[in-house]
Amino acid sequence: MTETLLFDRERGLLTVRLNRPDKKNALTRAMYSQLAHALTMADTDPQIRAVLLTGSSDCFTAGNDIVDFLEQPNDLDNPVFQFMLSLLDCRKPVIAAVAGPAVGIGTTLLLHCDLVYVSRDARLRMPFVNLGLCPEFGSSLILPRLLGQAKAAQLLLLGEGFSGEQAVAWGIATEALDNGEAVLAKAREVALRFESLPPEAVRISKQLMKAPDREALRKVIEEEGKLFTQRLRSPEAVAALSGFINRR
C-alpha cells in the first residue's frame, strides 16, 4: 500500500510530502492526524530546525477528500482541527512548496506558513461557499486584513481562483518560480538555511511576529470550525457535495 505521506529528514530539515497522486493529494483524516503528529514532533525535536511541506511537482493538494470527510463525525476534536492547531502553534519555521492545484485548505494552510514558494502557474482557490460551506483555518480574519474587504470577498464569497504570481503580489506567497522542480529546490535551499541560524533567535522572532494575532486567530478558527461543521449538514452543502462526488 502506497504511503500517503512521505517523511524525509535531511540534517536539520524535516520534509513532509503529500503522496496521493491518484487523488490529487486530497487529504484524509488519517493524513491530517499524521501531519499534526509530524508538526508536534518537529516542534519538540531540538535537531529539527525547519519543516518543509510539499506535494508533487505538478500538484500540491486538491483539498479535503470529500468522501472521507463526510463518512466520519465532524467536531473540533477531529484530526483536521488537530492539524490546524499544530500548524498554528508550531514554533519552528514552516516552509511550503506549492505547484499546480492548491484547493481549499491547500490554500488556507499557506496563510500560516512562514515562507511560501509557488510555481507561477499554481492554481489556488478557496471554493467553500460554492460547496455550501464557509471559510476555515482563520481565512475569514486573515484575508480581509491582508487584501482588504473587496479582494477577500472576491476570493471567499465568489470562490475565484488565482495564480502563483498573484499570490506573491498579494502577500500570500514569498516568491514565484518557473515550475514545480524549481519551487521545491528553492524551498529546500531556503529551509536548510535555518540549520545555520541561531534556533532560539529564530523561535523568538517568529513568536514576536505571530503574537499580536494569535489568540484572536485561535478564536476565529474555533468559530469557523463550529459553523463549518454545521454547514456540512445543511441542505445546501449536502446538495453541492453530493453533486461534486457524482461528477467525480
Image: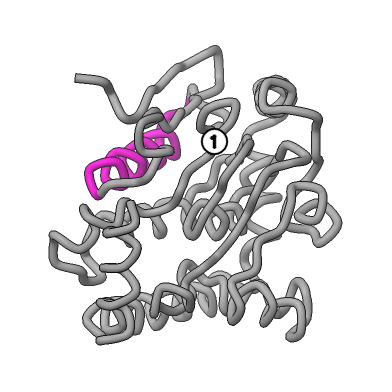
Residue 32 covered by magenta stretch: yes
Q: For the point 46% across and 51% down, which residue is it?
A: 87
Which quadrant of the figure has residue 216?
Answer: bottom right
Q: Is residue 196 visible?
A: no
Residue 127, percent across and down?
51, 68
Quadrant in which the N terminus is drawn: top left
All told, the count of numbered labels is: 1
**Could you tell me which secondary element the residue under label 1 belongs to?**
loop
Residue 17 covered by magenta stretch: no
Q: For the point 29% across and 57% down, which residue is it?
A: 66
Residue 213, percent across and down?
61, 73
Left or right: residue 228 compared with residue 58: left
| Image: magenta residue range | 29-46
Which quadrant of the figure has residue 70?
Answer: bottom left
Q: Name the residue under label 1.
A: 59
Residue 59, percent across and down?
54, 35
Left or right: residue 118 compared with residue 243: right
Instruction: Name the chief secondary structure element in magenta.
Output: helix
Nearer to me, 214 or 199: 214
Q: For the point 73% across and 36% down, which residue is it?
A: 119
Q: For the point 68% across and 20% down, which residue is it?
A: 181
- What kind of residue is marked 1? Cys
Coloration mode: one colour
Mark 1 is surrounded, within 10 Å at the Cα level, by few (under 14), some (14 to 19) or many (20 or more) other residues, namely many
